[in-house]
Amino acid sequence: MPIASAPRLRRRIAAAACAVATSAALLAVPFGSVAVAAPAAPAATEPPPGGVPGVPVPSITWADAGDGFQQADINVPYDYTDPQGRTFSLHAVRLPAADPANRIGALFVNFGGPGGPAAATVREVGRDLLPPEVLARYDLVGVDPRGTGESEPVQCTGSTAEQAALPYATVAEFPTDRVQEEQAIAQVRAFAEECRARNGDLLDHVGTLQFARDLDVLREAMGDPRINLYGLSYGTFLGQVVANTFPTRTGALVLDAVVDPAWASGPLDTVSWIREGGAAGSAETLGRFFELCAEAGPPRCVFAADGSPEQKYAELAARLRTAPLLVPVPGQPAQPLTYSTVVTVTVGLLYDADAWPVLGQLLQAVHSGDGAAVAAVLESVPQPPMPQGYLNVPDARAAITCGDTDNPRDPYRYGEVARELDATTAPYVGSRWAYLGLPCAPWTGRSTERHTGPWDSWTRNPVLLIGNRYDPATPYRNAVAVHDLLPNSTLLTVDGVGHGSLGVSTCASSLMSQYLLTGATPPAGTVCAADRGAFDPVPTSALTSAVRTGVPLG
């Protein structure tokens, strides 16, 4: 069965994974174990909870959170080298299994980012996330990773206004010339310095391996023998760390939109997000957008009117590099729409196939040089609620990414990589992905422990990997590579576009549900079709996702 409220679901997940460009911002600029016999696995001794001797197992007191949801704050070790010392408070929300007598266990969910909250996302879309038959058998549990959401959140600036004044440090934009590059380098230095001053050694204790240990401790606290996890995007990196740290405790593990573990480590002159494949994925998916837009033609893709979409994009990009387009804003001076913003929004809207027609409308308006038409496109789209209060996502993303991954210390290296990619394999989008790593150049936080391999452990239960053919953040080749690494894994291919399979393919949803309920994986080589083409008609409500997609990262 199709996942209910798929557009709302994708919109909220995209926001959790770090939406940094919305229509309003655009105008303001900056825009339990599986119930099957386990396969034979090499004999291994079960590690203690968290994988470290002496870790106290917390007692969880769940409180009512309304509408059948529960919430709790749970203490785990702050540092696993001192398991009985200082504690770290994790915030969790769960939707208890509807059929507790036949409960399989807790199913942790992580929506990516890094830096996206899980607890609030589960509270908002938990009932729509998976089919009822799955929610009957699992407690759905969203735990805010360390430093995110309400789990001792990292805060690098004093206010939302101060944060907004640092578009390069928060990667809302990227520099396009040498003057902007110097501004960006100055911003990230100030951002890193203030973040360390405000957060102290918290920046060294928000790593992925530490959170993987946390999940194992929570598993034990909830009385489950296995770790069950649905991970999307960065959540697939978390899942790989879980699988390779606790292979004998792996239960149902779904990794959707797969991150290449090369994200974590590599030569020190390489950028983590480029190793992960983001630039390649965006370039391939943008090329697919051009192809499908041309095939659909107006009115389904208005950007195909009067010329090749690919050529028209090159023309509008060249113009914006020279001078921004002024966009009228009611009650305010007209705001400049820059080359950086258009590329950033383009990448963001590629995440959701339902947003591709809107992207076509937006690009057509930009190509025409009509700022009022740009404003009209955005005004025609239903507006979702804007986040309230301080947005922790950019800060948590920097803390986790820079603490967990290898990146150049020379801040000028990012521009070199960006310009090379723009000129060769990843036109336009290369700079977007290369500069995502720039905050890591001056960053002083470093995870006290990191998992940098091995990545090829035999897991007690099979791992289900899901990859879209055209994914702008985690290219399909990543899923193939991780399938080759994990010997007890199955790859499910979705012949569709966008970031992740949720709400995209009924076939994939059904096979994932079958796996979660029985442990049965699809036959090797299974390919699921998308339910709808990128430029097929969609309900008006689906267009809301177009303005919330922004640019989730990995």
Image: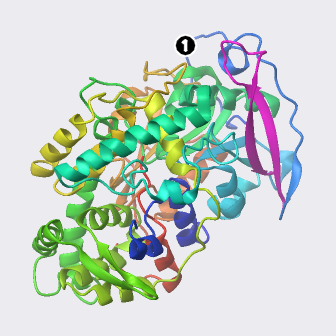
In the rendered image, is residue 151 in sight? yes
Q: Quadrant of the N terminus?
A: bottom right
Which segment did they paint magenta?
Answer: 68-96
> With 504 as the anchor, is 206 left or right in this view?
right
> With 429 as the anchor, is 187 left or right in this view?
right
Residue 436 on the magenta segment: no
In the rendered image, is residue 508 in sight? no
> With 237 as the anchor, is 77 left or right in this view?
right
Which residue appears at 49% of the width and 24% of the height? 446
Secondary-structure class at tag 1: loop
Indicate the position of residue 167 as horizontal and vertical percent values.
39, 55
> With 109 as the anchor, is 383 left or right in this view?
left
Indicate the position of residue 157 as horizontal and vertical percent values.
55, 47
Label 1 sits on residue: 42
Which of the two residues, 175 or 405, is positioned nearer the viewer here?
A: 175
Residue 79 on the magenta segment: yes
Which residue appears at 56% of the width and 33% of the height? 197
Q: Residues within 10 Å of mark 1 (few under 14, many from 20)?
A: few
